[in-house]
Amino acid sequence: MSDKTAPGKPHVGSQMIRTDGRDKVLGLTQYVDDEAFSGWHGATVRSPVARGRIRSIRFLEGPDWRQFVIVDARDIPRFAHSIHGADASHGPAEAGQTADVDLNIVKMIVDDQPYLVRDEIRHKHEAVVLLAHPDRDLVRWAATRVHIEVEPLPAVLDYRQQASPAQIQHGKDNIFKAYSLRKGAGEQEDLWQKVLADATHVVSGVYETGAQEQAYIEPQGIVAHVELAPEDEAHGRWPQKPFHVHIRGSMQCPYYVHNAMKHLFNQPDDRIQIVQTATGGGFGGKEDYPSIIAGHAALLSWKARQPVKMIYDRVEDMQSTTKRHPCQTRLTTALDAQGRLLALEAQVLMDGGAYVTLSPVVLSRGTIHAAGPYSIDHVRIDAKVVLSNTAPNGAFRGFGAPQTIFAMERHLDRCAKQVGISPAEIRRQNLIEPGQSLATGQVIREPVALRQWMQQTMDALNYEEKRANYKAFNDQQLRTGGPLRRGVGLATFMHGCGFTGSGEVWLDSIVKVRVASDGVVEVCAANTEMGQGAQTVFTAIAADALGLDTDQIRVIQPDTDQVPNSGPTVASRTSMVVGHLVAKACDDLVRQVEEKGLLTGARLLPSQAPISEQSDGRGRRYAAADLQAALRQLPGLQGWARYQPPPGVIWDDQTYKGVAYGTYGWACYAADVQVDTTTMEVRLLDFVAGQEVGRVLHPLLAAGQIIGGVVQGIGWALWEDVVLDAQGGMANANLTTYVLPTMADVPEIRTLFQEQPYGYGPFGAKGIGELPMDGPAPAVINAVAMALDCDICSIPATPERLLELSMRPEGTSA
Amino acid sequence: MSHSPHSQPPVRPVPAGAVRIACTINGQAREFVAAPMRRLIDVLRDDLGLVGTKEGCGEGECGACSILLDGQPVNSCLIPAIQVQGANLTTIEGLASRDTFNKTVLHPVQQAFLEHGGAQCGICTPGMIVTAAWMVQTGQPAADVPKVLAGNLCRCTGYAHIVTSVQAAVEAGQAAGLTERPAGEA
Amino acid sequence: MLADLEVVRPTTLAQAFGLLSLSAQDGEPLRPMAGCTDLMVDAHFGKPMPKRLMDLSGLGKDLKKIEWFPGDNADVGLRLGALCTYAQALAEPILHRDLSLLAQASAVVGATQIQARGTFAGNVENASPAADGVPALMALDAVIVLQSAAGQRRVALDHYYSGYRQTVRRSDELIVAIEIPSQSIGKPGQWWRKVGTRSYQAITKVGLAAVLPRKDGQLSDVRVVAVAMAPSILRCQHVEQFLTARAQAQISLDQLRAEIAKDLKPIDDIRSKATYRAEVFARLLEQALRQTAP
Ligand SMILES: Cc1cc2nc3c(=O)[nH]c(=O)nc-3n(C[C@H](O)[C@H](O)[C@H](O)COP(=O)(O)OP(=O)(O)OC[C@H]3O[C@@H](n4cnc5c(N)ncnc54)[C@H](O)[C@@H]3O)c2cc1C
Ligand code: FES
Ligand code: FES
């Protein structure tokens, strides 16, 4: 071992090899379906219609039904005495308090979704009956041999249409959640009218974005093992004595599943164990849905007295799991003669699907991002998310923001046209500057330089020159009957990092680090590696916070028995919020070593800049060898950190005013496209993604995140189309007809990073995960609109839709 | 429908029409008994424990299940067991080698993926790497990477780092003279 | 279920024909299996399957050849054995030189892995209205060679389909080869375009395979084959007639649209729209005519 008295080379900012990389390239990483398993396999029988009452369930001939374990809603107690209180979503019940509730409810935000249909089917492919059997192929086949007879009820199949009384299924009006946000004259009708009347231009438009499937390549899967008390082993009724529930599987948020299982089985925290196995992509799709599969597998396991594995095949996964919310946004803007935005009105309507799930939070982010990174004095936004009888829509990278950003960015290009200036110029006129305020009233204090950053993206794409050349090119093609058209497009946008408003305070995340018996420091957090590199980034942060080598750090597998609740792996919060806690927990660990006097003789190193406003990285003061030697003497020692909000993050949920996010990622994306007007196929020639995301912790991983998000965004803009059948079920639920981009469909996406360190992220980092989903669709569609000189207002802009649009008479829009 | 929780149904016996199949997998002679139409991916993963091969779709679309069959990349989800009678198979488990100290040495394509960020969540990675290894071996030009790997879907990376990984490996392979001449090219 | 299916695996053609005729007599015909890129998808997703199948992979020595056969006038045609795959054909320089239509079509069937397994014969027999190998072969006047214990017969590919996903093959017959006649090899005016859902791994939404030779400035002996425009892939009789003996200058897009409407009634489905198909097909044809004009 070399005696290290000089500080080692930092890992943050380096191209260190990802910690999970070697196993992944060798094919050794064990995903849930790869783990050794001896037990039974589960399958789900699903509803055939959009809405209705179950008349009967018939088990058709073929399978020997005596060999199967069968679970339906009747197996789950309806009026259990809950130990968690009637509505535990607002925190745990007081000691001793109990309440009567239906355990057949997936715990999320609102208690409306059952694990298994009890009374009324609310969407096609909703789970009705569960089967288990030792043979996987047999149980899947048997699931096709169950017939569910339904008395249909009036269903809502188009969220844009006003529901008739017979279609009302939620509250008085099928509205899951509504927000309104007002700024300046937005508060007062007469003032508002005056702003509009005084404007030189008033531009309106309706923009629509479609559903999108996350399409992680590893389908959802869970293994459950319920261990009953001996007294409950023998009978088939709901267990009376306390028991254990163990869940392993592909998921983003172990503690969400933990909370759900705790309620379903009415057990205290320590009887539920959730372990995240290697996860083959999530993108939001494994945020809430794994709770449902976990519940199903665990119910089967309880009844079968066996571990039960449920792995969805691709078709089932696409039919039954959540999608991105379809959204319609109506915008009206008032502008002055130069193209300054005076006022913006937005009406946002999202399709929540059959149950509330995460819709309120998705809508919230969509609302806050609707006005974009622009300084607009007068704003009015009304947003609502409504029920429809399709599979619930849920989390997908971007979480509501891509929808409203698409509308705003597309709208701006249309405004520019009306004002008679270029798309770049209208953005220059309106991009926010330090000291100005967003729609929420949040004053921007970071030293943003959006115009300059936009220019850098434009230069990288050679935007101005291409724009001029393409105009000439298109004219020439038109004159000579050539089929090709070219265009360039821009989008400028931002994405709030972390949970909205007081969300992070409410989450109250905790991270622990501990010294293992071999002296290695273990990072214990509930945040999951699903490809984005969380494990690598945590390793680098902990190593640099302590001044140790990465082989002295181990990030342990998220297991609720081992790791504290550091919150969900969503909302671009993992590196910034949880990574920050990792650094602070390391500080705490060192502080304790100091208190024990084990570092008094240690050699000191020159001091370094603090890691953040809240973390000094005190381990770095000591020679690594000395700190390591001290740690080795203290196996079991733990360091803790708990979330502390940055000062000034004050948010009012009622008025939608205040500081919605501690910080934002800022971006300008530019696309260069060619359209073959013979077929209306769009080909991307180039794409530049420029962003400011604070300090870049790992350049290669960061670029990988951005490029991955960009390609998902391009897919959403051009090809990915969720087609619904007459019952609201996904008609193209397979990878053949739901069209994901292949390697041959996208150019090499280029990335540019601006780095403005953020004081409340580790080493200055901000969140990065979702930002790249927001900009590609408007940038690409703006480019296509230029190429075709037409008004495209909805995506996906498939060749079929572009052809229809191009053949429409002048002046109508799609 | 209820049944006594303790009546253990028998695990389904090997089907009546099952056949004995002999083939070579990763250089080793293997024999197994399977229903003739059993999917090769199930044989590999469930019967032989070679779980490095992944299932992303079961319909030939995603390429996560790619393996080499007699030297050509194929989707193992579409191959019935009976068709590998006497065949030579390579899976992701068969690419790395061992040095004199019995330490695992990554295949050049695996090394390139590691260095250039070709793997993120890792679920598409085995199929990508197997197909890419074939590219390197058959000496196909680096410019063809997107075309040759278009049958391997990835949802994480946006492909750029996979392209650079494979191109690096292809170029390194050419430099090292590791490649065969592509079949059929004059 | 896959596990319930039985498979026989003959190793000689004689065995194969014997098995086929026996099973046909029993009224439970054997389903042949080649590359299984269509068949396994159907079987896995529970499409109805005959209980017994016949794997052809043991017949490689007879059926996997690409060879020349003597043509009408001392010249030679090209015979693709029934087990010939896209990848195998693409490795033949002749394909790129004289049968560009087939080369282009083969190169975008599925992607690498599908091209390694999929066969032309499987493509033909699968009878999908959106197939890519079939239109190229049809435009090249390919002939399907069917053989049974009773003997051989040849059916022109453009007479091979009798309805939606129906072929004239009897259940005791096997496709043993596909022949491309000598006149088609190196025939000028070959033009091909697939409009798929994406660049690879794409199902054709609309496609055109055409051979548009000119004689003294006029079109003659033309082939126009439409993909995904009708219940089966077919030659457009009216369009071909219309084009014959016409010069480029005498053809307008509107006329093409009108002629196409006589031959084809495309439909809306999950992948595309009737209006798109009809319009794009007309535009493709117009482009083909322009690009093949001398
Ligand atoms: C992911 C994917 C992508 C695809 N992309 C394309 C594409 O782009 N274009 C395209 O055209 N197709 C495509 N296909 C379909 C398929 O690959 C082709 O149709 C292929 O040519 C079928 O050949 P096969 O040998 O695999 O046929 P098999 O699946 O083995 O057989 C298909 C049918 O033909 C019958 N059959 C096979 N051989 C014979 C014979 N010698 N005599 C009599 N009957 C026979 C079988 O009984 C069966 O009914 C794709 C398939 C997949 C899974
Ligand atoms: S699992 Fe075989 S191609 Fe997707
Ligand atoms: S790395 Fe996740 S799918 Fe490719």
Image (spheres, grey):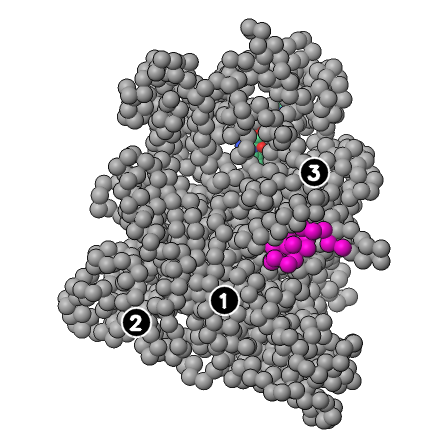
Chain that bears disc 3: B
Chain that bears disc 2: A
- Reading the image, the residue beneath label 3 is B180
SS at circle 3: loop
Magenta span covers which residues?
Answer: B105-130
- Left or right: A509 as drawn, with respect to B36: left
Q: What residue type is labelled 1?
A: Ile
Which residue is drawn at the image coordinates 29% and 47% (left, top)?
Answer: A471
Chain that bears disc 1: A
Q: Which amino acid does label 3 sit on?
A: Glu
Q: Is residue B110 magenta?
A: yes
Depth check, mark 3 against mark 2: the one in front is 3
Q: Which amino acid does label 2 sit on?
A: Ser
Which residue is drawn at the image coordinates 60% and 49% (left, top)?
Answer: B167
Residue B120, image x, y percentages: 60, 58
Ranked by sequence position, the earlier of labels 1 and 2 is 2
Which corner quadrant of the image does residue C171 belong to? top right
